[in-house]
Image (cartoon, coloured by chain):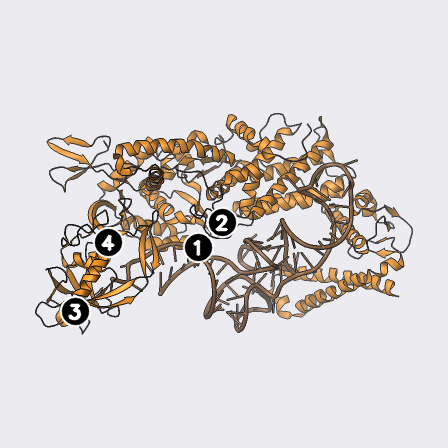
Chain colours: A orange, B brown
Amino acid sequence: MKLPKVYEPSDYENDIYALWERSEAFRPAKSGTPYSIVMPPPNANANLHIGYELTAVLEDISARYHRLKGDSVLLLPGADHAGFETQSVYEKRLAKEGKSRFDFSREELYRDIWDFVAENKVNFEAQIRRMGISCDWSKFTYTLDAPVVTRAYATFKKMWDESLVYRGERLVNFCTFHGTGFADIEVAFKDEPGKLWYIRYPLVDGSGDITVATTRPETLLGDTAVAVNPQDERYSALIGKTVKLPLTNRELPIIGDDFVDVQFGTGAVKITPAHDPNDFEVGKRHDLPMITVITTEGLLSHEVAEAYQGLTVEAGRQKVVADLEEQGYLVKTEDRPHSVGHCYKCGTIIQPLLREQWFVNMQPLAAKAIDTLRAGSIHFYPDSKKEQLIRYLEGLHDWNISRQIAWGIPIPAFQNVDEPDDWIYDDRVGEEFITIGDKHYRRDPDVFDTWFSSGSWPYATLGGPESDDFKQFYPLSLMETGGEILYPWVSRMIMLGQYVTGEIPFKEVYVHGYVMAEDGSKMSKSIGNVVDPIPVIDQYGSDALRMGIISGRAPAVNRGYDQRRVEEARNFCNKLWNVARYIEDILGDNPERSKPVASAAADHWILSKLQRTQEEVIQNLDEYRFSEAYDTIYHFVWDDVADWYVEASKAAPNKPLLAHLLESILLLAHPFAPFLTETIWQTLAWEGDSLLAVRQLAKPLASDPKQVAAFGEVQNIVTESRFILNALKVSGSTLYYSDVQLIKDNAETIKRMARLQAVTEVEDGTGLYLTTTSVRCWLDIDQSTAQSYLKEIAAKQERQKAVIAQLESRLSNENYVRNAPREIVEQTKQQLTEAGELATSLQREFERFSS
RNA sequence: GGGCGCUUAGCUCAGUUGGCUAGAGCAUCUCGUUUACACCGAGAGGGUCGGGGGUUCGAGUCCCUCAGCGCCCACCA
């Protein structure tokens, strides 16, 4: 079969993927060590971005590599309903049509978003196929699939029964635009310029006043105390007295509490328990009333004086400040930057609001996870991420899992309509009301935080502890993910996994860095610097993007997308294509399938290189050094095979060995360039209809070290000849030698590769002797031409002197000889010997031509 | 206020437990239409590894310190 000159990926990729799917090549093998990866489910609300390409490719390389090793590999794909994320994407869409979520009931919204997601799922499944991901589509799991939902309910029920989940009225982070509460982790804090207002609160007994400092004067309307530090001599005597709250007719107690920082502001703090997390804690300790002055819409509530009701927080702030100033309560104003929490989606300032929600008591879960991590039961790449996760877990607060949105898994809890404190667990979430005995219950309208259900992903996707898949593949071998979901997802999978199954959910965690925009900044839709993988695949091919995106990338280090890397990989694909084209051409349509046997020195040399390459690739991939593994194959194929072996073999092609070499390359490169290698495999005349994707690595063939060394000399001769001919700008020279077996054996190869007129054996003669080889040979270059080569020789001599001096001083250092490992010292001695030999022959040539 | 990462050739970056004369791709320069490949071949130039100090026989690699860039966490009213 005649291959075209240039590899055109788009001509083959779709057919190859279809072939794999048809052949069920990605089902786990019946035998072999289990190796399992569950893919992080992408959000089912948009096209896949380049970051997902990286995730998927790293997982696919691992999966394909383990298939090569003969393991039983499960790579499980899925999709995430991504509750709040998806709803906010959908809301943006509604906004474009001039609508909002308020135009629909929750049920209508849920149904519409379901359809919206259904469209997108088809989309990104196709994209994953284009990336060449070898996942088992028969195991595809969606976070809203009944078994996953059932699993989430079982977890909730277990927590309910064991009192790990509780209903509490607490301050929650509330986005007044989206109308929902968030977990702490979903709040994005930003440093912003702000002001510190100093406000005078007069003492009721008329004995003076106390000044407080605040960044949020509007919350004054909800103050229920003023706190001072009991150790603070300035104020301790005032504890127990009352102040009059400006702009209202309320009176507040002055209380003492250790939390007050004597150094900050005035040392006296206004306490607004319903709108500040610290104040909330103080309020609970001192049993203070909690007055909600800000509504879920972000407006001042009916609890405040009529003049302020219905104002936005910002307008309320301005009016409060103006009124304070007018009435003489405002002492002074200072500029003060401070950290403000925003909704990570829409940027709205997060309001801490008092709400009744479901919380998970994280203490016991986190403690166990910390123990597990400390014990080293889960291996992290890079290791530093483990410490980072431990620190996060140590500071973990209780987890608010209620979300006031339509799109999500309904919380299976019902409230007694007559007794608000009576909550029961029931999974009949399809009903709004249920009746048990003579009691009537109403379903909690809220849904779970997405991470609550995705925390169970590793075992939920495997069908739970009773299933065969679970028994075979749990704990997962690898969890590969980006650093941004280490806290929200990885930590919760560990905690929930241990809680529900009693085992760790995965044995290894690989954290990749982000793919940044080309200028190194963060990719962002609004800036418009997002790289879409599909057009890149269209242009360069899927394999080129796969290799380009992992090339030169270290774990957990952010790096910009670099098109040049993709081009490099595209060129590599074409190189490999042409190596195959050449070899297949040489072999013809009906090649004999004889056993590969090394005969020429080049044969032995390439076999030793192949063996080294295979060992290095295995070692690198076992430790998830993807970039190094790729680099190893790249240079083996390009430098060793294409530039040396293929050229050398043209003198006398060893056909069976060429065939063996091609097969070996295809196997080794397959995890990195699956489409290309399979495409070539399908063209092999001797392979019938077998599939590369399910092949296994073979044991490398042995080689003779003497022959390997001989080819090393051939390379020295070729390289130096090329250098001299290039430097002297001469061509058509002849290389002479007398009685050197390795030159005699490789004469044709040397002639071709060094572009010589001839390689000729003579009794004796003269010319320019080669210096980098231990054998005696020379180029027929005349005295006058060679003169201009003198300065090259002189320069080399200088360099050699420096090298020798360095090596000698190293060896004359007693401490070095005594302390360094013996092989290192031996190596140095060897180097010195070689450097000496080279210096000698350089000197000889220099003298001969300068005389 | 803590924590983490980065700083290596003109550009983008590798460099595993300290051990060859520090590497790659791209870019640059000189040659080259050799029937696998111009998405190519041959050759070349280019770095005191951010600054300073230390440990060591030996430091790009380990420790301290300074500077710059970036990220994450945190309830400083």
Depicted A460 relative to depicted A233: above or below: above
Residue sitting at x 24%, y 52%: A352
Depicted A150 relative to depicted A313: above or below: above
Mark sitting earlier along the chain (3/4): 3
Numbered circle sitting on residue A313: 4
* Dot 3 crowding, Cα within 10 Å, few <14, some 14–19, many 20+: some
* Dot 4 crowding, Cα within 10 Å, few <14, some 14–19, many 20+: many
Q: Which residue is mark 2?
A: A517
Numbered circle sitting on residue A384: 1
Alpha-carbon span between mark 3 and mark 4: 25 Å
What SS does tag 1 mark?
Answer: helix
| Chain under disc 1 | A
Labelled pair 2, 1 in contact (Cβ < 8 Å): no
Alpha-carbon span between mark 4 and mark 1: 42 Å
Alpha-carbon span between mark 2 and mark 1: 25 Å
Q: Choose top left, top right, bottom left or bottom right for residue A499.
A: top left
Image quarter hosting the C terminus of chain A: bottom right
Labelled pair 3, 1 in contact (Cβ < 8 Å): no
Alpha-carbon span between mark 3 and mark 2: 53 Å
